[in-house]
Amino acid sequence: MTTIPDWLGQRARTTPERIALSYQGTSVTYGDLEQSVAALAGGFVERAHGVGTRIALLGANSLRYAECVHAVSRAGAILVPLNARLTAAEIAFQIDDCQPTVLLVDPDSAELARDAVSAAQSSTRLEFLDRLEPGSPLLPRPVDLAAPHSILYTSGTTGRPKGAVLTNGNHWWSAVASALNLGIDQHDRWLATLPLFHVGGLSILLRSTIYGTTAVIHRGFDPEAVGRALTTETVTIVSLVTAMLDRLLSSGPFDYSGLRAVLLGGGPAPRALFERAAAQSVPVIQTYGLTEAASQVATLAPEDALRKLGSAGKPLMPTDLRIDGDGRAGSIGEIGVRGPTISPGYWHSARGVTSVTEDGWFHTGDLGYLDDDGYLYVVDRRDDMFVSGGENVYPAEVEAALVGHHAVAEAVVVGVPDREWGAIGAAAIVLRPGADPTSEELARHCRSVLAGYKVPRVFRFVPDVPRTASGKPLRRDVRPWFA
Amino acid sequence: MTTIPDWLGQRARTTPERIALSYQGTSVTYGDLEQSVAALAGGFVERAHGVGTRIALLGANSLRYAECVHAVSRAGAILVPLNARLTAAEIAFQIDDCQPTVLLVDPDSAELARDAVSAAQSSTRLEFLDRLEPGSPLLPRPVDLAAPHSILYTSGTTGRPKGAVLTNGNHWWSAVASALNLGIDQHDRWLATLPLFHVGGLSILLRSTIYGTTAVIHRGFDPEAVGRALTTETVTIVSLVTAMLDRLLSSGPFDYSGLRAVLLGGGPAPRALFERAAAQSVPVIQTYGLTEAASQVATLAPEDALRKLGSAGKPLMPTDLRIDGDGRAGSIGEIGVRGPTISPGYWHSARGVTSVTEDGWFHTGDLGYLDDDGYLYVVDRRDDMFVSGGENVYPAEVEAALVGHHAVAEAVVVGVPDREWGAIGAAAIVLRPGADPTSEELARHCRSVLAGYKVPRVFRFVPDVPRTASGKPLRRDVRPWFA
């Protein structure tokens, strides 16, 4: 068992005067953050949300949200950050899956939280982030790297979300891996405009604490606010997905001279975007990341951005990466990863944790190849997942919702490129005999059971859809229909 | 079991064009280093120096020495870097303790090595560093962090050296801890003028590989060469002990503008030295390190160098540090450390590895206190160890040598400050009745059994020496005799 000092506690001990968090003009030092977190954690434990429990968090990014991320760990509980864009039914499913004792909710998401808790079977309390009672300060205790830190829900082939468990060690190693790639400058200020409920945002908060640097938090993504923060907040690194970078570049001009990296996730970006970024001297670092790998797996250095266009670069230091298949450069196969950032498994309250790996490797479901120089190219995301406005959309989940409508016999959903959102959903529909619904009706149905970003924007009614012999939809053959 | 990719192998895969080593005008890329190391390791295995064996290294710093450090790991053997300043008898003792299958020796240390191997009981082969036969390249394999990487001999209370086992994980965590303190810049070039057979030098080599930065290697310490290397070799960090820094500052002026840190070890330095360094804008970072902790435990930031004069600063991120005793600021007690950099134990070929820790803490034997702000002050090194010319001298070992002379009844050795060497040994001697040796005779006797740096420079014949009730010499009471 490897234990190390509590990250925040050690930073409060060694670098108490440095700025830990910056949010809407407020700066919080590590010393002050330690005090808030210790008191919040004490309150959690006094209300029986302690060791062995799960604590769910629902809401947009905020200072209090960030404090609670640390306080949940301090209390010895497991953090479950929930996607605030989901429907109440979707959240209820996740609550029943991991059975948190409490759901901490931002006032803006109060109605959603109430509906979700009502719809759920488990007895989960509601507490409001702006009205949390502090308790006696809970002092730092050593952190066991093998212990679960958080459960992050991700969808997949089944269309049902699965809770990937990330240990303290997964997050620690991810932070170290990123540092060994990007370097560490104690004056770094990393902007979290991605939601803290996704691994891309959460990891900014955790690695900044480990480094003793500053996490600058925005409540949501606003390209103008990001552009201004580059100078007013002296941001040095920002994590974005493709559609966000596109909007940022269109909103300028901004002063990018203090920025040392834009970490760009969310799948391959078009050449034109890299060219526009290069023209404005924006240092873009493309990355391939996964929830089950605690974020980054491979990254492409800025100097290779145009030379190796479309590549996600090379694996990070502690991560081993392979392509299943014949091992030849250029051969497409499933991407496998292993190493200390990989989740030990998916959480199931009923039957424990099921391993995410087989023979030590996590089979990502994503397809890719390595070129002659060993650079990774991701050619298809698993289950034809696509990213819309920074959110992963799994077609299987949307198709399941569509066939839940009485008029739909079959549905195949694909992502199609979109200037504003990166990608949007497009659905090919085979109707039941005699049915004749409008696109609007199907969209409305989807919206009643799915988060808005998952709802297809384009519908096409077809007599038949292509499928494999085993009945899996051939999305690749459907995609050209929407070109 | 946590495994990660082979450090050098991963660097050769991800950053093959970066410079790994620079030595006497030769630069070696990670790609080229990988090839040399793979071939050397193949040769070791073909000559049966593979998994489960120890490989000892004897000599001054060189490119080939550095390659062999990596090649021993690649072969799956445990590295035993021996101190080239020891006598043949001292080396023979260590060889018999860890029983290496081979001693790799620099031509300059050939005679010493032959004498040592002759004097040793174990059947250890001699191979010359400049005549090593390469073998079929041995490709990188995953590194088990819990497996031993090296055995480093350190003396202690008993006067007999003990081989501290350092695992792959100890070195990895030490590299990460240092990075989280000093930051990482991919253009860093860290000068190793400290011997690679000590943890202070060895750790430069290993952490540079982990970071993908450059280790600049000097064969030995030459202040003029260090001063020139600051510009000709664009050195950004250098590790020195107090006496070395003193000589460097006296040899200048040099251009320190590209230097971001002098990591200063070897015990508290005098105020005047910090003031001279500050006057020349040399960014000194004092550190407290231990072989059993894979090097740095705590460090003082440059901005605190004068404000917290004499302090070794604060513990590194993954290291927990405490002072035994009442826990009040200012109270002196034994320094305890724990965390993933701490050695699992001392090697004994006969009876396995004995733990260095009790109840999870390594009791360093050093005395110190924490001030109100939590800064560490080391007031006495364990067993009154002192550092002479960069080498640790343990009085107990020197005293044991002195009482081995027929004329000496009792001996107490202390370190006294010295401008050139940092400290030199001074011996208080109680003679046997009727004996009347000269100081020169006692020094000559010491030189026949001890490395030269351990031999006292000052002798004082006294009727009696102060001791504790249990018979331990009270060195603190002896020290003023030599003031």
Image (cartoon, coloured by chain):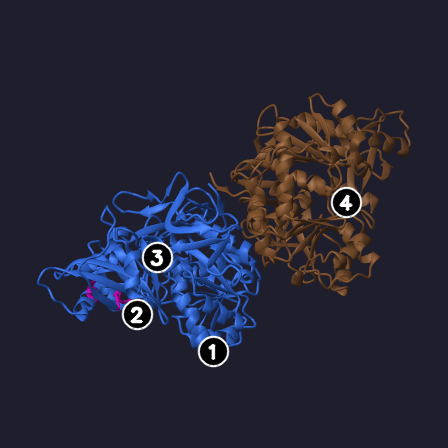
Chain colours: A blue, B brown
Residue B383 place in picture, x, y as percent:
69, 39
The residue most toward the left is: A434
Which of marks 3 and 1 precedes in the sequence?
A: 3
Amino acid type at circle 4 is: Arg
Residue linked to disc 1? A252
Q: What kind of element bears circle 2?
A: helix
Amino acid type at circle 2 is: Pro
Give the letter of the chain under mark 1. Answer: A
Q: Badge 4: how crowded within 10 Å, few (<14), some, or many (20+)?
A: some
Mark 2 and mark 1: Cα distance apart in space: 32 Å
Residue B407 visible? The answer is yes
Residues shaded magenta:
A446-457
Amino acid type at circle 1 is: Gly
Res. A107 mark? 2
Mark 4 and mark 3: Cα distance apart in space: 58 Å
Residue linked to disc 3? A44
Residue linked to disc 4? B219
Q: From the image, state whether disc 2 or disc 1 is nearer to you.
A: 1
Residue B304 picture quarter: bottom right
Mark 3 and mark 2: Cα distance apart in space: 19 Å
Residue A195 picture quarter: bottom left
